[in-house]
Image (tube, coloured by chain):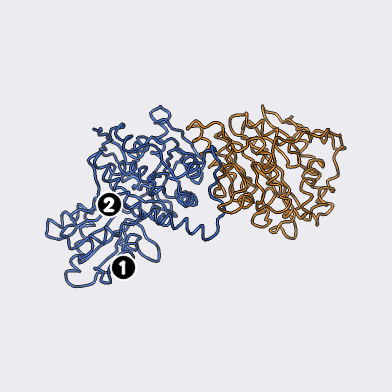
Amino acid sequence: MGKVVPITGNYAVAYAAKMARVQVVAAYPITPQTSIVEKLAEFIESGELDAVMIRVESEHSALAATFGAALAGARAFTATSSHGLLYMHEWVHWTSRARVPVVMAIVTRTIGTPWNIWPDHGDFMDQRDTGWILGFGMDNQEVFDLTVQAFKISEDPRVYLPVMIGLEGFILGHTTMPVELPDQKELDDWLGPRRQGYVIDGREPLAIGNLAWPEDTEEMFMDIQKAMEEAKQVIKEVDESYGKLTGRKYGGLIQCVGCSNAKYIAIAMGAWAGDLIEAVQKLRDEGYPVGVVRIRFVRPFPIEDLWKIINGVKGVIVFDRAISFGAWGQIYTDLVAGLAQYTRNLPVISNIVAGVGGVNVTHTDFYKLVKNFVDIVEKGEQPPVFTWYHKR
Amino acid sequence: MAQTRPKPPLPYRMRDIVLPGDAACPGCPIPMAWKVLAAVFREKMILVIPACCSSVVVGAYPGNSIKASVVHVAFASAAAVASGIAEALKKRGVNDVQVIAWAGDGGTADIGMASLSGAAERNHDMIYIMYDNEAYMNTGIQRSSSTPFGAWTTTTPIIGKTEHKKDVARIMIAHGVPYVATASIAYPHDFYAKLQKARRIRGFKFIHLHAPCPTGWRFDPKYTVQIAKLAVETGLWILYEYYDGKIHLSGPSRPYMDPAKRKPVEEYLKLQGRFKKMTPEKIEEIKKYTEMYWDWIKRHM
């Protein structure tokens, strides 16, 4: 059995990296990620974690060094936020295209300008095209669980792709909640030793990244697409086996709350999904047949799982905490594009973009928005396809 | 000039590690330098190469012209990736493999400067070699901060470069790393000895390797070594090592402490098309700058 400790979301990440026995951490400070690196530095200097810390001079180098360490056979980890993530963007692509397993925590924070330290999902959603597996937690326990699972997923031979785990800055990052840590020995057995597709450690000559002709390059990228498909199964298996180990099973790529016999589905990702679940619970008590789907993984996008839930419902309301300017929220966009392959008769789907720039959205907002959506559809009317919900 | 006895050949069998059939231009100094690396490290080296001529010289996938490990990395990152590799190897107990960041002057003096500085300050166990062809040659001869004063490039097309070359070796000395050296592809024995010394020192080692480029400097490919040699003989390029807080002048450069023993700068300039438009005033400026460089060397010996 594990033990329960009261820790912040950032510390949950640090504990997870420690319990996954990372060997190299390369990181650079940025609010609100910093306390992950601080905690890991403390673990390493106190001798609790047998790892090397590379205190790099930039985020670009943070991921570059993490890549180098992982390439050379070490289990490697880094974490960042917002501008740090944007600064390392070149390396985000490079790492996945080289198929090097790495885990990185993203403590989400609004992208500037203006300077803003509050959380939305803009930095995280910006990574959808990078070839990383993208998971996002709802509370500190899930953040811990997802982070250790990320190593297992990343290092699965069917996948060999890097994994990002998202959590909102401050809302989770700096908020203390009880987190159950598994038994180290049991976790070691479950996770197993480091696995990767290839190692460059000089023992035999091996080159990675040489100039490649278009056809060769395209085939390498097609393999990433295949690995993403495989990852769907791997994520479910990992959720399953981790569930056996800890008693916590989340449902794989999505989590459903009250979806069976729901006529309406509300979709959200991240900590505010907790507020949504609370609001929907109240609505259900009032007789509204609404369920919540919580997105746990944005990449690979769980369209099969979503279709199973959405097939037959009357309406879907999608909450996005980020926007692709000139289009819509990203989860909405991916959902509609994905559903189009199953049916020409989509249910009514509305997209609410909210909470951008860190604006606080509570369960009372969700209550109001979901209720309003259901009422309009029930009246036989068409709700707006897109609303930027702003409270002032 | 002092006559020296012919040196024994370096312990390297041609076509052992550096394979024929690469994609280098005729007269390219890069494979010449790699043969010296191979003489020291054999297959037991990991070259971390950012965007530069060398990323093309090794050839296209699935081919590779070096029988050693090569990691191609994003432009600004050679030193950072090498940091990660070096630490992982140490952690895993692999200690018979040399991690070498191999980067051009653009990838070192310009875009890679921050990651180089970071890795040097953290003193990771690696050798960083800046092979200096004095411009962005892979993209087609654009000015870098390491391009010398007066030189034509495609981005200094009419007037020539109006600033002097950035002295990266001196910047690395200021980092307090255990070993800094300059070298030249014309003096393989000197380069070899410096690599042998560097491999025995733990921590960050920096070698600034002068590497004339026939394509970019506009000279006949047969003159690569001769021009590299002239750079030393005119006193424009000074070979030295820095350790224990002092400059140690290397053998080939020792005679040229005395300005009277140096060949005229013009002999170096006139062989290169990039200096075709040099005025007497500009040549005077180069001479003045060279004197200042020597003064700095002498003060720190």
Rendered image quadrant of residue B169: top right
Which residue type carries mark 1? Ala
Q: Callout 1: 10 Å neighbours few (<14), some, many (20+)?
A: few
Instruction: Give the letter of the chain under mark 2.
Output: A
- Between A85 and A309, the residue placed more toward the observer is A309
Query: Are dots 2 and 1 in contact, CB under 8 Å?
Result: no
Image height check: is A274 above or below A374?
Answer: above
* Residue B200 x, y percent position in the rendering: 62, 29
Q: Which chain is orange?
A: B
Q: Label 1 belongs to which residue?
A: A340
The mark found on residue A272 in the picture is: 2
* Residue A13 x, y percent position in the rendering: 35, 40
Which residue type carries mark 2? Trp
For the residues labelled 2 and 1, the Cα–Cα distance comes to 27 Å
* Residue B101 x, y percent position in the rendering: 59, 41
Q: Secondary structure at mark 1?
A: loop
Residue at coordinates 63% horizontally, 37% vertically from top-left?
Answer: B42
- Between A280 and B52, the residue placed more toward the observer is B52
Q: Secondary structure at mark 2?
A: helix
State which quarter of the image contains the C terminus of chain A. bottom left
Q: Nearer the viewer, mark 2 or mark 1?
A: 1
- Between B292 and A319, the residue placed more toward the observer is A319
